[in-house]
Image (cartoon, grey):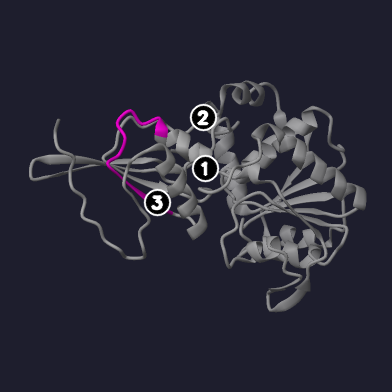
């Protein structure tokens, strides 16, 4: 699957009995403009399902661009920069699309500069542009009519030198850079030059794992260490959960309930403890199916479903 995560179906045959295993992968949200909805699976004997947001609900996607515009306007009014740590694949392209639509609707200052500062994100964006047939229908119709890039003042900073020049940008710019959790890459330089500025804003649009720099900033740390230096956190810290590429609790449940033949066992993985337990409880309220939350290196013997 070029755009979005992959759901895997695997059939295993042993002693004349065949079992079907389904791995959800990073199950995506529905009704996204650039990627199609997750495929519906008809049946599974054993389901391994992610739980990143298993205990949470996202904001309504319809408000996503409105919330982005609000953050942009507040930051530009202060005269600062808007720094957005974003994963290079899909998240950056979602942001670009919303910015294009805001520009098309004449809601953005045409002089405001937007920088995509990640070679991987730039390369991924080029792949998205070449695969417009994968977009949702309405998005495809808009993005293939004329030149959508005309509506925003966007710059692709490919080289290290171009990236370093952005550190001299004092205000009224949007800088979208990787990595999404602020653990490596060019984003750390932009944070170092903007976190201490009260007029700037750091906007998180993706999941921040426990222990990462992004999570520490989001959780309210007042001082963080970047490249061996202590940096005070004085910028506004904002978050728009609706940009997440992961389905929330209801999205996971809706996908599971679409199975015609439900699994005999469900294994919940890829989530923090609270998210895994929250999803397990939600599933148990709907289905009488054994649910397991595996420990590290724990093994299970899978018994094939008896033929009816």
Q: Earlier in the sequence, mark 2 or mark 3?
A: 2
Which region is colored magenta? Answer: 257-269
**Contact, CB < 8 Å: mark 2 with mark 1?**
no
Q: Which residue is mark 2?
A: 134
- Identify the residue at image location x=72%, y=69%: 221
Q: Which residue lies most toward the left here?
A: 15
Q: Position of residue 206 (x, y in %)?
A: 62, 50
Q: Is residue 3 visible?
A: no
Q: Position of residue 135 (x, y in %)?
A: 55, 29
Is 6 part of what is drawn in magenta? no
Q: Residues within 10 Å of mark 2 (few under 14, many from 20)?
A: some
Q: Which residue is mark 3?
A: 268
Spatial separation of the CA atoms under disc 3 and disc 1: 12 Å
Task: Find residue 30 and name its label.
Answer: none
Q: Earlier in the sequence, mark 2 or mark 1?
A: 2
Q: How many marks?
A: 3
Secondary structure at badge 2 equals helix
Q: Nearer the viewer, residue 238 or 81?
A: 238
Q: Nearer the viewer, mark 2 or mark 3?
A: 3
Spatial separation of the CA atoms under disc 2 and disc 3: 29 Å
């Amino acid at each position: 699957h070029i755009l979005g995560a992959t759901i895997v179906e695997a059939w295993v045959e042993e002693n004349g009995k065949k079992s079907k295993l389904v791995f959800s992968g990073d199950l995506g949200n529905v009704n996204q403009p650039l990627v199609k909805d997750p495929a519906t699976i008809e049946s599974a004997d054993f389901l391994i399902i992610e739980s990143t947001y298993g205990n949470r609900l996202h904001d309504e996607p319809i408000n996503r661009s409105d919330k982005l515009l609000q953050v942009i306007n507040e930051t530009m009014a202060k005269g600062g920069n808007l720094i957005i740590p974003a994963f290079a694949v899909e998240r950056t392209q979602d942001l670009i699309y919303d910015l294009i639509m805001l520009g098309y609707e004449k809601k953005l200052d045409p002089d405001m500069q937007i920088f995509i500062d990640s070679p991987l994100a730039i390369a991924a964006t080029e792949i998205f542009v070449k695969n417009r047939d994968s977009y949702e229908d309405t998005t495809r119709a808009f993005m293939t009519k004329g030149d959508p890039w005309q509506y925003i003042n966007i710059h692709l900073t490919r080289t290290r030198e171009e990236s370093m020049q952005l550190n001299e940008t004092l205000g009224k710019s949007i800088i979208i850079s990787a990595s999404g959790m602020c653990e490596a890459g060019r984003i750390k330089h932009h944070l170092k030059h903007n976190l201490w500025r009260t007029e700037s804003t750091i906007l998180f649009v993706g999941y921040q794992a426990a222990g990462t720099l992004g999570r520490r900033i989001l959780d309210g740390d007042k001082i963080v260490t970047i490249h061996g230096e202590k940096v005070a956190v004085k910028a506004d810290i904002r978050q728009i959960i609706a940009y997440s590429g992961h389905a929330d609790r209801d999205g996971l449940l809706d996908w599971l309930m679409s199975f015609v033949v439900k699994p005999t066992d469900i294994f919940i993985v890829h989530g923090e403890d609270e998210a895994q337990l929250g999803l397990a409880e939600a599933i148990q309220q709907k289905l009488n199916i054994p649910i397991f939350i595996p420990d590290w290196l724990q093994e299970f013997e899978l018994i094939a479903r008896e033929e009816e």
